[in-house]
Amino acid sequence: MNLTYHTTLLAAGALSISLACSTLAGDAMLEDFETAPEARWDYVADTVMGGVSTGQVQFLRDGNDAFARLTGTVSTENNGGFIQFRHLLDNPLTDDTQGLRLIVRGNGQPYFLHLRTRGTRLPWQYYQARFDTNASWSEIRVPLSAFKPSGALLRKEPRAKDVTSVGIVAFGRDHQAQVEVLEIGTY
């Protein structure tokens, strides 16, 4: 190996580190569940429209980790099928937001992120993206382009500046839910 080859490798490595740092530098924290999350998050179930799903959200600590835990029974009886906890955002997401970042764990079931925007005026309108869980904390990145509208009257893809709320949802089928969220942010 010659000196030019080593210099090229060092330059490529420095570029990779620089790109990784700039990607991380663009991340912003929306929620870490440290200080009074119960003041910002609401539990909602399909009972508001006649469904029979039951559940709860708890805000817990495990050593230095503060997190939210959504548990319950999701039932599709009586046109139901969801439990969720959601947060109305105080500030809009920045225009350069490309997606949401979560640190989650759960019971191996799929769960969903729901976004509401200035364009989702009716209670049953939202944008939805699926994510999977396992027993270990995992970081998940969900691009805005992965969110699908709940109906034909909505834009094909949500715009970051229009997002008004974020929800973590157990949805769409009969099952026992348990999903925990350590962080929610943007990238």
Image (tube, rainbow, N blue to C red):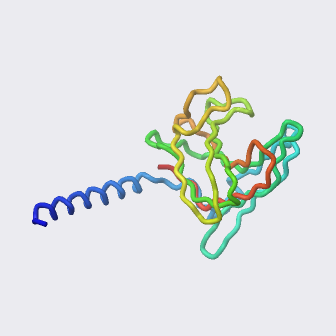
| Quadrant of the snapshot with the N terminus | bottom left
Q: Residue furthest bottom?
A: 63
Residue at figure coordinates x 54%, y 54% from the top left: 140
Residue 80 position within the rendered picture, expressed as x and y whole percent measured from the top left: 83, 40
Instruction: Measuring from the top left, give residue 64's x and y in whole percent.
Output: 60, 74
* Vertical order, 187 against 105 (above or below): above
The spot of residue 66 in percent (x, y) is: 64, 67
Q: Seen from this angle, which residue lies furthest top?
A: 153
Q: In terms of depth relative to the viewer, which is nearer, 144 or 58?
A: 144
Measuring 31% from the left and 60% from the top, which residue is drawn there? 17
Q: Is residue 63 above or below residue 157?
A: below
Q: Position of residue 154 (x, y in %)?
A: 62, 27
- Relative to 57, 103 lies left or right: left
* Residue pictured at 54% horizontal, 58% vertical: 139
Picture quadrant where residue 124 is located: top right
Compare residues 76 and 166 and report the one nearer the observer. Answer: 76
Residue 179 horizontal side relative to residue 158, left or right: right
Badge count: 0
User: Is 62 drawn above or below residue 41 in the view shown?
Assistant: below
